[in-house]
């Protein structure tokens, strides 16, 4: 595992946004980064991290024991450019004394905005209607042309895993006069009560919601949290929104439920086998899709990158990470 890398070397698996790149340059830490268009291939990561003290990575990079060992004993910090950190083997990091950090807080609003965009687009069939017009179909105003779910004024939103992003979604939903119910430890908090959120169990939430929106992290206990039985437990008119992580939903069961009319529609930003998307999903008219762009606001991405850089710099300066992951 010999290497000629300078002390404090930081490898970034992507090209940092401009402000964060300048912030990192100002630390004086030696850096390398991957400039390819679609993410650094794993074989390249295994080479480029050799001798690194810090790695700044994306949620699509699997940072496991093999990568940590490829970096070697110099590696002190892995800073994820994401709030979710299911791509990092925390146990392997702990065993090696490597600090792991993420980017909580700075992307709540952007992700909540996209959640509402998918919710409204799916409920009111905006993408279907857009395709219909572009296809040159004849039309006149008709009482049942693209009628969909009324969101404002009483539809029930069920937030699964109420945390920072779920609360940001709830604030927006409250402005639409939605009735809001939620699961998760913060569902009974004063913040939730102030938004009129009622804490419920998952079976209650599935039975009562017109819109089910997922905001829990992906862990061993949330993998396939929404499978065939849960989809069957939803209203046949209900829509499922997922801006969290794909594997929280059993995607095969989801395609079947949508195809068989067990649920009304889905708005999806994330997929079980990302970047692959089930062909069955893409063939369904009642599904609105986006390619994992929940946090893709220009300023949000700068803030995420800046926080990742601050985390690396703090750890390599011998301080604690700004936003460490508790593993
Ligand atoms: C995250 O930060 O985990 C988001 O999924 C990025 O969009």
Image (cartoon, rainbow, N blue to C red):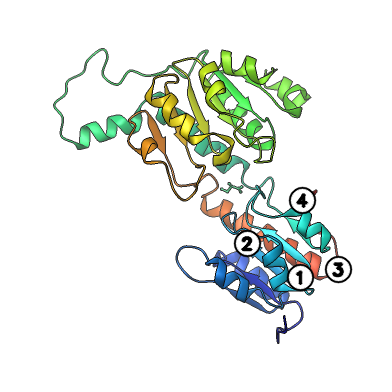
Residue 269 visible to the viewer: yes
C-alpha distance separating marks 4 and 2: 14 Å
- In this view, 320 is above or below 26: above
Mark 3 or mark 1: whose residue is earlier in sequence: 1
Q: Mark 3 points at which residue?
A: 318
Q: Name the residue under label 1.
A: 75
C-alpha distance separating marks 3 and 4: 17 Å
Q: Is mark 3 within 8 Å of ligand 1?
A: no
Which secondary structure, mark 4? loop
Q: Name the residue under label 4.
A: 325
Identified at 37% across, 19% down, the residue is 148
Identified at 56% across, 43% down, the residue is 110
User: In the displayed image of the protein, which residue is found farthest to the bottom?
Assistant: 4
C-alpha distance separating marks 3 and 1: 13 Å
Q: In which quarter of the image is residue 162?
A: top right
Q: How crowded is mark 1: few (under 14 residues within 10 Å), some or many (20 or more)?
A: many
Q: Where is residue 317 in the image (x, y as percent from the top left)?
A: 82, 70
Between circles 2 and 3, the one closer to the viewer is: 2
Between circles 3 and 1, the one closer to the viewer is: 1
């Amino acid at each position: 595992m010999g290497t000629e890398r300078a002390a404090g070397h930081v490898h970034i698996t992507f090209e940092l946004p401009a402000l964060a790149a300048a912030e990192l340059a100002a630390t004086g830490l030696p850096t390398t980064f991957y400039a390819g268009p679609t993410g650094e291939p794993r074989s390249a990561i295994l080479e480029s991290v050799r001798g690194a003290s810090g790695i700044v990575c994306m949620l699509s990079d699997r940072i496991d024991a093999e990568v940590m060992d490829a970096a070697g004993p110099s590696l002190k910090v892995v800073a994820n450019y994401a709030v979710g950190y299911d791509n990092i083997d925390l146990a392997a990091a702990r065993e090696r004394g490597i600090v792991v950090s993420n980017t909580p807080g700075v992307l709540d609003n952007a992700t909540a905005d996209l959640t509402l965009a998918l919710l409204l687009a799916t409920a009111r069939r905006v993408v279907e209607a857009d395709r219909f017009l572009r296809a040159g179909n004849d039309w006149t105003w008709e009482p049942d042309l693209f009628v969909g779910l009324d969101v404002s004024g009483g539809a029930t939103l069920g937030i699964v895993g109420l945390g920072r992003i779920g609360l940001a979604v709830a604030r927006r939903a409250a402005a639409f006069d939605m009735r809001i119910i939620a699961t998760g430890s913060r569902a009974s908090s004063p913040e939730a009560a102030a938004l009129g959120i009622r804490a419920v169990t998952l079976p209650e939430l599935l039975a009562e919601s017109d819109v089910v929106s997922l905001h829990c992290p992906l862990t061993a206990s949330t993998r396939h949290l929404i499978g065939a039985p849960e989809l069957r437990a939803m209203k046949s008119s209900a829509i499922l929104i997922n801006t969290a992580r794909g594997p929280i939903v059993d995607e095969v069961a989801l395609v079947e439920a949508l195809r068989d009319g067990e649920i009304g529609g889905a708005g999806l930003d994330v997929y079980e086998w990302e970047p692959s998307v089930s062909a069955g999903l893409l063939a369904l008219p009642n599904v609105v899709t986006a390619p994992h762009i929940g946090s893709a606001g220009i300023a949000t991405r700068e803030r995420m990158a800046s926080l990742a850089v601050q985390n690396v710099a703090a750890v390599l300066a011998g301080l604690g990470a700004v936003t460490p992951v508790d593993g």
